[in-house]
Image (spheres, helix red, strand yellow):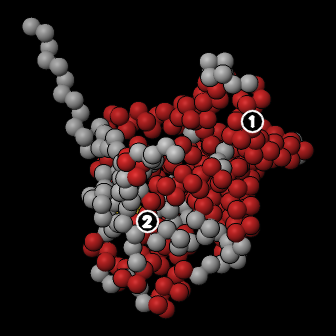
Amino acid sequence: MQAVSTELERPLPAARRMDPREFFTSEEWAGLAVRSSWRGLALVVHAWGVILLAGAAFVLWPNPLTFVLAVAVIGARQLGLAVLMHDAAHAALHRSLKVNDFVGEWLCGAPVGASLHRYRPYHLTHHRFAQQPEDPDLVLSAPFPITRTSLRRKIVRDLTGQTFWKQRIAPTLAALKTRKARGLTWGQVGRGLWDFWGPFAITNGIALAGLSLFGLGWAWFALWLLPMATWYPLVTRLRNIAEHACVSDNDDPLRHARTTRASLIERAFIAPYWVNYHVEHHMFMHLPCWRLARAHAILRAKGVGRRMETKPSYAAVLKLAAGKPERAAAPAAA
């Protein structure tokens, strides 16, 4: 039998896990950790309800203001659906794993082009190795801080659809273009593309057909695809920056992620469904999202908040993340 390399035998530097008993009484933890059969489903209904109301507002009162608001609100709730799929990845959306996975896959992930079955192993690896070299999400936080100019370029790319094209469309075109070079048959390429696009095509095809029956087929493009190509990438980027960029200690579970206090407006347009409580999520990753604010309040009441990485707003996070000095201008030629 071939010997296993010592490199493969080397234990990876997993992030340190937190014991809830260090912070909560048995009664407090029982109240926090209990699963619900209706709260997660209610949040999914809420997300779709907000999306429909925002779209209806523009359909009933079409003007530039209601259009811009609809795009921003819908894009934020598309992130909200991804957040709820994230809860499903931790089996926190519903007590029944079958219901949890079905809702997470088909009502949350697939409509926005995500996949629970692909996301779960990737994301749990992130939790295991948070901010360590093996963390697959480290690439999202490692480049920061950056300059204000660089941040502005990223925001422009998000809002003009360039990020959407790079992340969604370009990989498909590359897969088709490099098929022969990689020695793949059309069947193999097709199966890969179906795994990536299939659930999205099914759910969005149903939505487009349903809207078209009422003469509103255009709304799928203007009030669903456009937010997904513009506002959704932007708020996803802001979420990624806030969660792990420029944290103060990559090895401390209370400081290798960040909790950002969010105003009502920020929760409506940037940070839905308590996604801003990221320290608490990394400390106790199986807590349902609707329990994170309560966990935060208990930790602050016990003085733990002083040890946690927090920021007072998303503006404060962006100021920190864009704190790298601009490169000095070259001296003029003599």
The residue positioned farthest toward the left in the image shown:
334
Name the residue rendered at 37%, 53% in the picture: 10
Q: Nearer the viewer, residue 310 or 56?
A: 310
Count neighbours of disc 1 (C-alpha within 10 A) and say few if under 14, some if 14 to 19, many if 20 or more.
few
Q: Earlier in the sequence, mark 1 or mark 2?
A: 1
Q: Nearer the viewer, residue 151 or 286?
A: 286
Assign a secondary structure to mark 2: helix
How far from the left and from the top, in percent, is residue 167?
A: 56, 35
Q: Amino acid at mark 1?
A: Arg
Left or right of residue 210: residue 3: left
Left or right of residue 175: residue 16: left
How far from the left and from the top, in percent, is residue 78?
A: 62, 52
How far from the left and from the top, in percent, is residue 173?
A: 64, 24
| Label disc, if present, on residue 282 of the rendered structure | 2
The residue positioned farthest toward the top in the image shown:
334
Count neighbours of disc 2 (C-alpha within 10 A) and say few if under 14, some if 14 to 19, many if 20 or more.
many
Query: Which of the 4 quarters of the picture holds residue 209?
Result: top right
Q: Is residue 225 visible?
A: yes
Left or right of residue 206: residue 269: left
In the displayed structure, would residue 194 be above or below residue 29? above
The residue positioned farthest toward the right in the image shown:
213
Residue at the disc numbered 1: 191
Q: Amino acid at mark 2?
A: His
Name the residue rendered at 49%, 92% in the picture: 27
Q: Is residue 53 visible?
A: no
How far from the left and from the top, in percent, is residue 87?
A: 59, 64
Query: Which of the 4 quarters of the picture holds residue 161?
Result: top right
Rendered-image quadrant of the C terminus: top left
Assign a secondary structure to mark 1: helix
Name the residue rendered at 71%, 29% in the picture: 189
